[in-house]
């Protein structure tokens, strides 16, 4: 029995295999429609979510399985003080696999240590979000044709953005990758990510506060929202939330084959006027999430 808590638990070969299976699901959906017949996914979402929760549920239903769970900790016994470990032990008697989102870092890891069924981390605080990273990787694979020789701009909240941290971990294992880190000083990438991922692997990276100065160099622009729920101080949030807004004007200097990604939800950091630009991939990216989660559920349930 195996869980997925951190993207680094997957080898490059396993990531490539998941992407390959996800691509096959997109091309041949009928082939997979009963792969998980009789299996039950429990979605334990202690924090609000639209895309992640619904795409997990849609993934399991598309595989012929069933779904149980809750979408808010207030709808669970956590509101009475039940521990994550106890909740997991109980739910593992009702389901074959768990997808958990939790505001506390490490909660899905605790869950995985208290059950004998697979647990998928669907986001834990500002820490990890491995299935979003798999979604991002599938998007990059489909839109760029592979993972090597890319300049990736990460823009916005690089301090609290768990999607950014996980994507750096994953992409740093491929060849000739350069990162351009675009953020206000208050939201710079944490030192441990620089030290353990970028510098330890001798990767080229640049830190800047200006999107306009670097947009012409990028093969991928990964936008993030400045997350109000991760701030302790509302004044800081209000001051920083509009630091980077992508507009058609800013895109005039960008490459024709740039792809624009965003884990969503978007607030105002990408103008709606960009949505019709052929380089905008963020809605496709959200759709791809279902297929890669289907591939992951099958892998962890050891379904051929």
Image: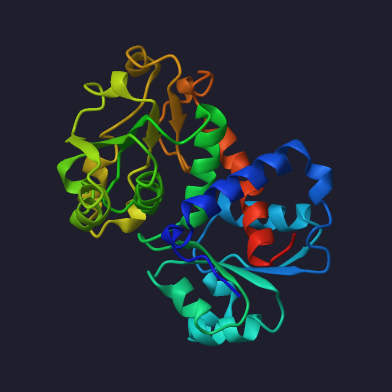
Does 65 sit left or right of 168 as displayed? right
Q: Look at the picture and state if 95 lies above or below 33.
A: below
Residue 192 placed where, x, y %?
21, 58
**Residue at left offset 68%, top offset 57%:** 57
The one nearer the camera, 10 or 266, is 10
Q: Look at the picture and state if 56 lies above or below 266.
A: below
Does 16 sit left or right of 150 as displayed? right
Q: Quadrant of the C terminus?
A: bottom right
- Residue 7's quadrant in the figure? bottom left
Residue 32 placed where, x, y %?
79, 50
The one nearer the camera, 38 or 72, is 38
Q: Quadrant of the N terminus?
A: bottom right
**Residue at left offset 37%, top offset 42%:** 225
Q: Look at the picture and state if 301 lies above or below 203.
A: below
Residue 253 placed where, x, y %?
32, 13
The one nearer the camera, 142 or 181, is 142
**Residue at left offset 63%, top offset 86%:** 90
Residue 79 seen by the camera: no
Residue 148 placed where, x, y %?
42, 34
Residue 208 seen by the camera: yes
């Amino acid at each position: 029995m195996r869980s997925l808590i951190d993207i680094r638990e997957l080898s490059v070969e396993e990531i490539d295999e998941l992407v390959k299976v996800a691509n096959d699901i997109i091309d041949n959906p009928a082939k997979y429609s009963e792969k998980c017949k009789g299996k039950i996914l429990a979605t334990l979402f202690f924090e609000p979510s639209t895309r992640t929760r619904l795409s997990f549920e849609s993934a399991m239903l598309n595989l012929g399985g069933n779904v149980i769970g809750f979408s808010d900790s207030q709808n669970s016994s956590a509101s009475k003080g039940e521990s994550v470990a106890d909740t997991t032990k109980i739910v593992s008697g009702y389901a074959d696999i768990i997808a958990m989102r939790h505001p506390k870092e490490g909660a899905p890891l605790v869950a995985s240590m208290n059950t004998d069924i697979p647990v998928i981390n669907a986001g834990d605080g500002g820490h990890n979000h491995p299935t979003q990273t798999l979604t991002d990787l599938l998007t990059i694979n489909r839109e760029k044709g592979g993972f090597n020789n890319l300049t990736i701009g990460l823009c916005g909240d690089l301090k609290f953005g768990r999607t950014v941290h996980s994507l750096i971990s994953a992409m740093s294992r491929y060849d000739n990758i350069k990162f351009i880190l675009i953020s206000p000083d208050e939201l710079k990438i944490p030192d441990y990510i620089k030290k353990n991922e970028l510098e330890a692997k001798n990767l080229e990276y640049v830190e800047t506060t200006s999107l306009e100065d670097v947009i012409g160099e990028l093969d991928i622009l990964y936008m993030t929202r400045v997350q109000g729920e991760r701030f302790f101080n509302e004044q800081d949030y209000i001051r920083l939330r509009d630091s980077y807004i992508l507009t058609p004007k800013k895109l005039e200097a960008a490459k024709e084959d740039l792809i624009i990604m965003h884990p969503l939800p978007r607030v105002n950091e990408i103008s709606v006027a960009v949505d019709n630009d052929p380089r905008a991939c963020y809605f496709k990216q959200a759709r791809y999430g279902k297929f890669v989660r289907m591939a992951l559920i099958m892998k962890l349930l050891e379904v051929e």
